[in-house]
Image (cartoon, grey):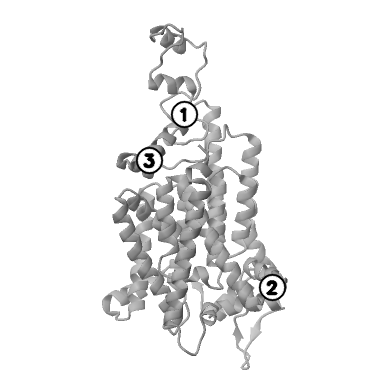
Amino acid sequence: MTLWRRAGGLRGVGLVVLLMASLRLFQLLLVGWLVPADESIVDRLLIWDGGWFINVATDGYPDGYSYDEDGVRVGNGFAFFPLFPLLVRGVAAIGIPAATASLLVAGLAGIAAGVLIYLLGTALWSRRVGLVLTVLVCAQPMAVVLVMGYTEPLFLALVAGTLLAAHQRIWWLAGLLGVAAALTRPTGMAVGVALAVAVFMLWRVRLAAERRVPPSPFPARARADSPAVQANALQTPTPAGGIPLLSSGQSRLGAGLSSADDGAPLPGMERGLLELAASRTGSAPARRVLGGRATLFASKGPVTKVELAWAMVAAAVTLLAGPAFLAWVGWRVGEWDAWFKVQTDGWGSTFDGGWSVVDFVLETLNGGSGMVELVTAWMIIGTIVLCLLAIMDRVWPPLLVYGLIGLVLVVGQAGYWHSKPRLLVPVLLLACVPLAKGLAQTPARTAAAVLALWSAFGLWFGAYMITIWPFTI
């Protein structure tokens, strides 16, 4: 069964698009409800870094460092990676105002992110897990950024698309989307490492096939003239028509329906039957089996040398894209570490290994009284705990590695603590997996109630953060 059919085809994807549009509409209604009377919704959606992206899109990058009237070096457009401003400039080139173009690019990317997360969850586990994961990620606290002029919606879509393409073994597309992700945010380096892990897994699958070590207890293929098959045929009852009546296990053996070719824990026929049982009858055991097992790669036959080479190229170009931009900034300014200096001067961003985050969390739990402080502290703690659960659950390794590196980069970075909820948005693609798999195994009404409460708080909190909260996000 193809991924498109497993995802419900056009009807399933259309449902996700409708769901995403509904969430974004509700988000905008909340922003409009909370926005001050002297400001517009558009003003709030383009605050803080949103203005920087528009400046880069319209004016390009500066020639060097920027200084204030006192001669103190300050931040400038070099801090922002190029893909999002480039897309905004492209849309603005057809006559659309840059501000509108920024929101249009972000809004479409947010809907695309929802669809790709749904397809990724369906490919790795099941359609139900994919749908729940989409709601959890796209309605979490600070999901408001998915309709703002920020890079998070584009980055989230590119990450999900890269991982999905890698799982489906479409390596040219994985490389293309991976490079795009690496040129969208600094966290894009995690995508390159994730692709490198996927390449290693692909090599292991090929190595196992070459050594003829099947990863399942059933042989990958059985020759029709082999002694084992002939012995089974002699012991199998034969009807009048002369065709042996094979048992289910023998049928599977003779057909070669195993996971030896692609390393998948569930053979294609078994998975299809389980999905049919889960969707048509609501079988809880079938949902539990599907929710607990993820395929290594889509079943597309044996891994060839050409495919392995394409996978290596995809990982290599993704790993090099981000450093290439940093090197370009250094060359333009004349100092190799220019990008890091701009980040520190403009936004106070340095890597301290997480000590500042630990201090913030401990101080907040020991006496913090502000709602935003408490939500941020518990969001950091919850994300770490959920990522640990994802490790214990053995989530698909490329997704796991991407999420863990992203978590380390966010938690290990010193800076504004009230920016952490936004910075954690891409990391929640991994952190929400244990929640999604758990909710997918509960009754539909229970899952719907939990997701409704989650969405209500998440969408309200995001609206609060860009309308009433006076500091940067």
Q: Quadrant of residue 133?
A: bottom left
Q: How far, Cα to Cα, is label 3 from label 2?
A: 47 Å
Q: Nearer the viewer, residue 58 or 192?
A: 58
**Residue 242 vertical placement versus 151 (above, below):** above
x 62%, y 71%: residue: 337
**Residue 178 vertical placement versus 198 (above, below):** below
**Residue 20 at x, y = what percent?**
48, 62
**Residue 162 vertical placement versus 454 (above, below):** above
**Residue 362 at x, y = what percent?**
31, 73
Q: How far, Cα to Cα, is label 1 from label 3?
A: 25 Å
**Residue 346 at x, y = what percent?**
56, 80
Q: Quadrant of residue 428?
A: bottom left
Q: Is residue 386 left or right of residue 264?
A: left
**Residue 83 at x, y = what percent?**
64, 66
Q: Amino acid at mark 2?
A: Ala
**Residue 94 vertical placement versus 177 (above, below):** below
**Element class at badge 2:** helix
Q: Which residue is mark 3?
A: 280
Residue 258: assigned label: 1
Residue 92: assigned label: 2
x 47%, y 10%: residue: 227
Q: Quadrant of residue 328?
A: bottom right
